[in-house]
Image (cartoon, helix red, strand yellow):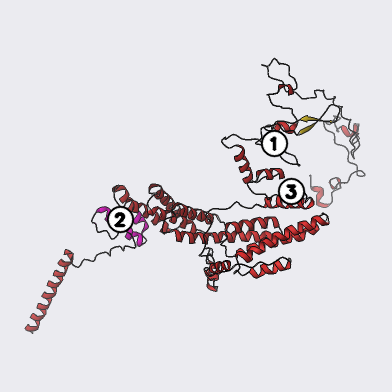
Amino acid sequence: MHRSFYRFFALGTLAFVGLTAGANMAQAGIFHRKNKPLKTSDDALASVQSQQPDKALFDRAMLALKKGKYDIARLDLQTLLNTYPDSEYQMRAKLAIGDTWFKEGGAAAMEQAESEYKDFITFFPNQPEAAEAQMKVADIYYKQMEKPDRDPTQTVRAQEEYRQMILQFPDSTLIPQAKQHLREVQEVLANHEFDIGSYYLTRDDYAAATARLQSLIDSYPLYSHADEVLLGIGDAYAAEARAVQQLRLDAAAKERLNALYVSRAAQAYDRVILDYPMMAHADDARDHLEALNQPVPEPTQQAIAASEAQEQSRSVVNLKDKVVLLITARPSTQQASHLGQPLLADPPPVLAPEVLKQMMADITWAQHPDGKPAPTITASNAQTANDAGTATADSNAAAQGAAGSGSNSLQLQDVTGGSGGSNADTDTTSAQTVSAPSSEGTSAPQPSSPAGNSIQGAVGIDTASPASPNAWPSSVPQPNGGLPTVAPKDSTPLPTAQAPTEAPDQINDVPRGGHAVNTANDNTAVSGKKKKNPKPKFKAGDESSSKHKKKKGLDKLNPF
């Protein structure tokens, strides 16, 4: 018994000594658990062995960012920027602050991230990380894109930022990724434009449909449904050719106009076969050409190989992807091409008013084929747009830029008639005459104003150049400092206005005499005094009222 007791006591003593020694060793740091160091993939400067406090702050911020503690990471990074302005981690800390907002997500956080990235590009424009910051700015809008039937504002901004990144940092290693994202963004924008053009086509608005679809194929040639776009353009011109038969034109003009629209439709169908021969609707384009009795072209082997490679680069959309697309707000970018160079600048758009002007010019050309052919109206052709009577915003800007080059003053243009327009840039006096009423009631021709005075020339005031004073109404020196007096040609006073004819008497249902005024008995009270406002006596034969009927029953007791 005593032996077992001593044995138990000895074991307890050894355990106590072991626990005490373990505690001392843990306190000394022998078994202390250290934090895992950051990998080089998390940060480029993580492999640098340093015991400097700025390095410790930066590592701690990166660890907090990795764990999703964005507030703590921003606090450590801001402390690093404020405390150690000469630290080698200043640039990475500035970029990492934007990363904390970017990974946090949300509309407000994305705005803060964009601001931080833009500041980084401003302070460090020549560093390789500036391309990364610009890429992150474009990714902000890329993540906020919506479906093609929604507001395309975020999608348009994403396209602008990716284009700026490719143009500003062409040597960056992120260029392939930026180009692929730009193709996906342009795929979404092309879907948006295609939906609008298809809607106009179903509404038989061929001018608007042609303008929208033509602008689409010019801006996004890598679109996955480019063949359908060209088919829509051809169908619009084919419909215009069929509608020519309803116009009030002679047979020869109808034939010329029909042949013109058929050739334009065939040109669109030809492009489907030649540029996109491996797309699904290439055979439909051949059928349309045969229906129009037009020759069917044959694509080259190079075009077939390029079209096939482009179609194979697109991802296949399966049933699962379609189901996910129905329940998410994100647009589908799987059909975007992975080959080809996306356009980095938008070509001049084709507007519906320009297409309408072209159609009117085509009709004029069909009626008068001996004249010049109908010009192709573009946004930069300001003179043609002015002759047509209406000008787009782009043509107005081009005209003002041409007239006011080197000057910021406003340039006036001549007011033209229906026969044609005059150039606002010329300094010579126009030979056009304006008719003004003369004293005999006939129309007398008068010289029009100079080219710069279109407003006065339109109302018929003679304002010739001051260099030729004989052209003014009076060449005699005037007492007002020698300046000529501007007066109208005909100063004959107008005839006196005639008095208006007297209006006939108004005819009313009630005679002018009104009701007969009651005499003595009606106007005199019982006391013999006259009433101030005598009331006419009620006559049951002339008027009908329930107020003057005799009361019956309990109504007799009602004093009112």
Determine which residue is flagged by label 1: 414
Going 76% across and 56% down the picture, which residue do you hit? 257
* Viewer can see residue 361: yes
Q: In this rendering, is residue 300 above or below 428?
A: below
N-terminal of the two: label 2 or label 3?
2
Q: Furthest-left residue in view?
A: 2
Determine which residue is flagged by label 3: 372
Q: Nearer the viewer, residue 314 or 159?
A: 314
Q: In this rendering, is residue 427 above or below 317?
A: above
**Please, what is the dominant secondary structure of the magenta stretch?**
helix
Range of magenta residues: 50-74
Between label 2 and label 1, give the one nearer the viewer: 1
**Residue 302: quadrant of the picture:** bottom right
Determine which residue is flagged by label 2: 58
C-alpha distance separating marks 2 and 1: 69 Å
- Residue 526 percent location from the top left of the image: 86, 33
How packed mark 2 is, by other alpha carbons closer than 10 Å (few <14, some 14-19, many 20 or more), is: many
